[in-house]
Image (cartoon, rainbow, N blue to C red):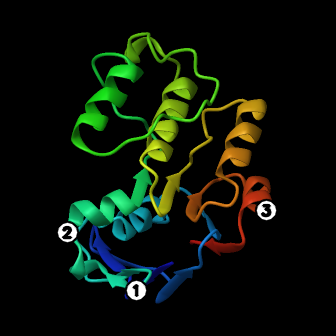
């Protein structure tokens, strides 16, 4: 499903080097952990083609260079750790995104804040709304950066259940979570 090779990036005079090749089959989850500053988010951003990188990316039988960057980012979707700021409600954000691209109805993640101003929603509610919007886009691969960091244990279990069977690269500081959700693990130092 997803193959990425040649991952390297210069940051502040040092070179971050990840495994030379990452491969994910359909439905598999690669769990990534490591200390803060070890390059977990930068790795996700490189896979998502959000930062300059000379790595080689392939989704199924199509290479990155055979797609537009927008198509790649729609099919290999990065869900950031910190939800963006937005003026309006979660429902209005859904409507704006749906006006630009095909977007299904977001799954029910128990969010009561869809019709409240975004700024009034808790961090966990915003995190669940962003995840629901990502799932509504129906990507082939999810790049998840601490998707449950702001959630209580019941909501964590709900999100883990909802994401079961989806192809994903999942960053977490919670080793027990990665034991539950990941087929493969990568520890960055």
Q: Is residue 157 left or right of residue 10?
A: right
Q: Which of the marked residues, 3 or 2, is nearer the chain's N terminus?
A: 2
Residue 113 visible? The answer is: yes
Say which residue appears at 57% left-offset and 58% top-offset.
171
Depth check: give the residue in front, 36 or 171. 171
Depth check: give the residue in front, 176 or 182. 182
Q: How far across and how far down the image is residue 3, in percent?
A: 46, 83
Answer whether labels 3 and 2 touch (C-beta < 8 Å). no
Return the mark for residue 61: 1
Helix, strand or loop at label 3? It is helix
Gap in angstroms between the C-alphas marked 1 and 2: 15 Å
Residue picked out by circle 3: 179
Return the mark for residue 50: none
**Vertical order, 80 against 188 (above or below):** above
How crowded is the residue under tag 3: few (<14 C-alpha within 10 Å), some, or many (20+)? few
Gap in angstroms between the C-alphas marked 3 and 2: 35 Å
Depth check: give the residue in front, 15 or 107. 107
Say which residue appears at 57% left-offset and 35% top-offset.
107
Q: Which of the marked residues, 3 or 1, is nearer the chain's N terminus?
A: 1
Q: How far across and how far down the image is residue 75, in percent?
A: 38, 62
Q: Is residue 32 left or right of residue 89?
A: right
- Nearer mark to the viewer, of 3 and 1: 1
Q: How far across and how far down the image is residue 9, in percent?
A: 31, 76
Locate residue 64: give its quadrant: bottom left
Depth check: give the residue in front, 143 or 165. 165
Say which residue appears at 47% left-offset and 18% top-offset.
114
Locate residue 139: give its quadrant: bottom left
Q: How far across and how far down the image is residue 22, in percent?
A: 51, 82
Return the mark for residue 68: 2
How crowded is the residue under tag 1: few (<14 C-alpha within 10 Å), some, or many (20+)? few
Q: Is residue 33 left or right of residue 2?
A: right
């Amino acid at each position: 499903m997803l193959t990425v090779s040649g991952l390297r990036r210069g940051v502040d005079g040092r070179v971050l080097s990840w495994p030379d090749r990452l491969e994910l089959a359909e439905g598999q989850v690669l769990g990534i952990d490591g200390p803060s500053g070890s390059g977990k988010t930068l790795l996700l951003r490189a896979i998502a083609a959000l930062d300059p990188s000379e790595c080689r990316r392939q989704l199924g039988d199509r290479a990155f260079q055979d797609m537009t960057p927008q198509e790649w980012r729609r099919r290999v979707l990065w869900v950031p750790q910190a939800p963006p700021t937005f003026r309006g409600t979660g429902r209005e954000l859904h409507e704006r995104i749906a006006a630009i691209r095909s977007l299904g109805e977001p799954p029910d993640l128990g969010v009561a804040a869809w019709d409240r101003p975004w700024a009034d929603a808790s961090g966990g509610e915003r995190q669940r709304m962003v995840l629901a919007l990502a799932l509504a886009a129906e990507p082939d691969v999810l790049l998840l950066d601490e998707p449950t960091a702001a959630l209580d244990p019941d909501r964590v279990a709900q999100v883990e259940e909802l994401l079961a069977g989806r192809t994903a690269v999942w960053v977490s500081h919670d080793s027990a979570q990665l034991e539950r959700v990941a087929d493969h693990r990568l520890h960055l130092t």
